[in-house]
Amino acid sequence: MMKMMRHIAFGMVMAVAVGSAMARNTEIYEPPQVLWTPAVASTQVQLRDRIVAAGKSLGWVVSKEDDGRLELRYDKQGKHQVTISVQYDTTGYQISYLNSVNLDFVEANGVRKIHPNYNRWIRNLMLRIGTV
């Protein structure tokens, strides 16, 4: 009887653990292209500098740079990392997910899911780019 109770208790603990792990994933936020007016950033260099400054203020670092494209990396306490691509030109910018470590990223049936913190970090970055 005691062995059966342990199995039931273990099963309940596992069900809660799996359920809470699943609850920690949400559909990945795919932001639309953000358009600029010339008053905000009239040159590609100004927009690049705006993106870099906003990212830096939130802990993002430029890990790679090409003309019109930045790769930004965010590291949360050495435990969780994410890398994104930011395509930009004089009309605006577009953020895209590239990869992550320890953020529970999964893709199944064309649906990409990740820890909700990723979506929050992206929204915060977008808000900061808009206010730098």
Image (cartoon, rainbow, N blue to C red):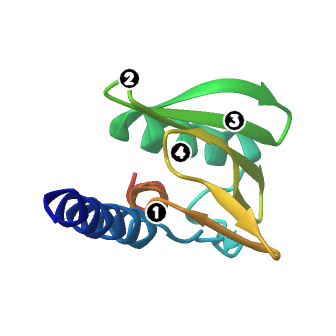
Frontmost of labels 3 and 1 is 3
Frontmost of labels 3 and 4 is 3
**Does residue 16 appear to the left or right of 102 in the view shown?**
left
The image quarter in which residue 49 lies:
top right
Q: Are marks 3 and 4 in contact (CB under 8 Å)?
A: no
Q: Which residue is mark 3?
A: 71
Task: Give the label on residue 78, or none.
Answer: 2
Measure how far apart labels 3 and 1 are at the Cα level. 18 Å
**Which amino acid type is marked by label 3?**
Glu
Could you tell me which secondary element the residue under label 1 belongs to?
helix
Query: Where is 5 relative to 67, above or below?
Result: below
Give me the residue at 24% from left, 65% from top. 4
Give me the residue at 81% from left, 76% from top. 109
Task: Give the label on residue 26, or none.
Answer: none
Q: Position of residue 77 (x, y in %)?
A: 31, 27
Could you tell me which secondary element the residue under label 4 belongs to?
helix
Measure how far apart labels 3 and 4 are at the Cα level. 14 Å
Task: Give the label on residue 130, or none.
Answer: 1
Q: Which residue is mark 4?
A: 50
Measure how far apart labels 2 and 3 are at the Cα level. 18 Å
Q: Residue furthest toward the front? A: 1
Measure how far apart labels 1 and 2 are at the Cα level. 28 Å
Frontmost of labels 4 and 2 is 2
Q: Earlier in the sequence, mark 2 or mark 3?
A: 3
Quick check: can you spot residue 71? yes
Q: Quarter holding the N terminus?
A: bottom left
